[in-house]
Amino acid sequence: MKRIGYTKDRDGKTITLIEAMADCGNVQKAYNKARKCKRYRKDVLIFTKDKEENLDRVRNDILGLAYEPGEYRYFKVYEPKERQIMALPFYDRVV
């Protein structure tokens, strides 16, 4: 059985945690945190080009419980020693 938590919004109404996560302000804040120090990378610029549509898609995926993570990008870093890095696409970082 799945439990759904509840919380209060700014107006004092009781809402589910999923609705709180998909709030426009929270999605915008998640976008800003994911973009930090990566502003001019190709995938960030592509996402930002249609930012409003992409943020709406993020909200709909969260509300509809339809989000599935994308493929990781693998690469190696050799400073100070060899390490394998696995990075998610920018859309997944926003979610």
Image: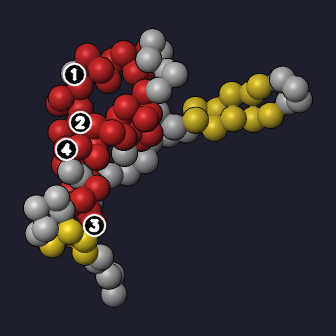
Mark 4–mark 2 Cα distance, whole angstroms, equals 8 Å
Mark found first going from the N terminus, 4 or 1 = 4
Give the spatial CA distance, label 2 vs label 1.
Answer: 9 Å
Q: In which quarter of the image is residue 92?
A: top left
Question: The N terminus lies in which quarter of the figure?
Answer: bottom left
* Three-letter amino acid code at the position of disc 2: Leu
How far apart marks 3 and 4 lie (CA) works out to 14 Å
Of mark 3 and mark 4, the one earlier in the sequence is 3
Residue that carries the numbered disc 2 in the rendered image: 55
- 5 versus 1 height, above or below: above
**Does dot 3 land on a helix, a strand or a loop?**
helix
The answer to whether 72 appears left or right of 25 in the picture is right
> In the picture shown, does residue 77 fall above or below 88?
above
Quarter of the rendering occupied by the C terminus: top left
Judge the density around disc 3: few (<14), some (14-19), many (≥20) Cα neighbours within 10 Å.
some
Task: Verify CB contact (< 8 Å) between mark 4 and mark 2.
Answer: yes
Given contact means CB atoms under 8 Å apart, are the residues at marks 1 and 3 in contact? Answer: no
Q: Nearer the viewer, mark 4 or mark 2?
A: 4
Identify the residue position indicated by label 1 in the image. Answer: 50
The disc at residue 24 is 4
Q: Is mark 2 on a helix, strand or loop?
A: helix
> Nearer the observer, disc 3 or disc 2?
3
